[in-house]
Image: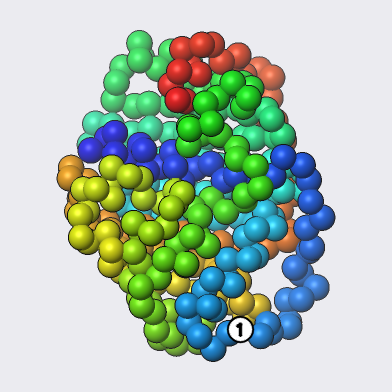
Amino acid sequence: MRRRVGLLAAALLIPALAACGSDATDGSGDANKEAAIPADPKQALIEATNALESGDFRYTLTGDQVKGEGAVHMPSNSAHISMTIGDAAQGFAMEMEYIFIGEEGWIRLDIQGLGADANPTAGKFHHVDTKKVPESSSMILKKGEADPVGSKALMNSIVEVQKTGEGAYSGTIDVTKAGEMQLVDKDTIEALGDQATKLPFTAKIDDQGRLVEFGMQMPAAGDVPAQDIKMVYSDFGSVTGIQAPPAADVVEADEEFYQKLA
């Protein structure tokens, strides 16, 4: 169970950033303008993910075993993510914090429940060169994408959806058709079996047509119990560039650490 939760969190943690900056538009000037939202529910949700492509927003993630928050700032090619997995009261918890600026990364992993010998650099950030991290790793910046969970792929995989209120939608998604989706890993999809073709979801968009909330009801899969996962997006166009951690809190990543990121 711990391994599965860790894989899920790792996939969610790392929003991808473009290799170079882009001119993101500050959305504050349009705060009082309503967008032309498509009447078709599925098309409305697909287009709602366009705002995430600018890479200038904050988000929070909540689930039974995972909680986190992050900020993406593509104009400075930077991101900051913090995450807690598990429950220390139940004997295991892992705190993770990530900072990425360009091709540099700083990763802090604090594990409770495995003993000090298994966590000798608790409280320290490992400075990594992202070019040394295998591209297959979920813990790497990928070019040209800023959405932390691949929301557009999810919306394109909707099986059925209906509008349930002003800016509110619900339906089902076939995650087996979502391709390079980061919200559910391949092992979990296999464990879900036929259920993976009809996962219940809810979503909300604001009056500018931007995705502001996405929730998925995950049934039990293998050794992972059923849980609800929710992403909330906010502060479009108002995030500032992320700063590197203080030098006193940083150690250089060794080969063993890079191997853990594979």
Which amino acid, mark 1?
Ile
Q: Residue at x 39, y 79 (%)?
A: 161
Mark 1 burial class by Cα count in 10 Å: few <14, some 14-19, many 20+: some
Residue 116: x %, y % from top left: 36, 14
Q: Specify the quadrant that holds the C terminus.
A: top left
Against 99, residue 261 (above or below) is: above
Q: Which residue is mark 1?
A: 37
Q: Specify the quadrant that holds the N terminus.
A: top left
Task: Please state the total of marks drawn on the protein image.
Answer: 1
Residue 88: x %, y % from top left: 30, 35
Against 161, residue 214 (above or below) is: above
Q: Is residue 28 left or right of residue 132?
A: right
Q: Can see residue 60?
A: no
Q: Provide the secondary structure element on which disc 1 rests.
A: loop
Q: Is residue 42 left or right of residue 244?
A: left
Q: Residue at x 27, y 59 (%)?
A: 196
Q: Can see residue 103?
A: yes
The image quadrant that residue 173 belongs to is: bottom left
Against 180, residue 158 (above or below) is: below
Closer to us: 14 or 67: 14
Against 77, residue 249 (above or below) is: above
Closer to us: 193 or 229: 193
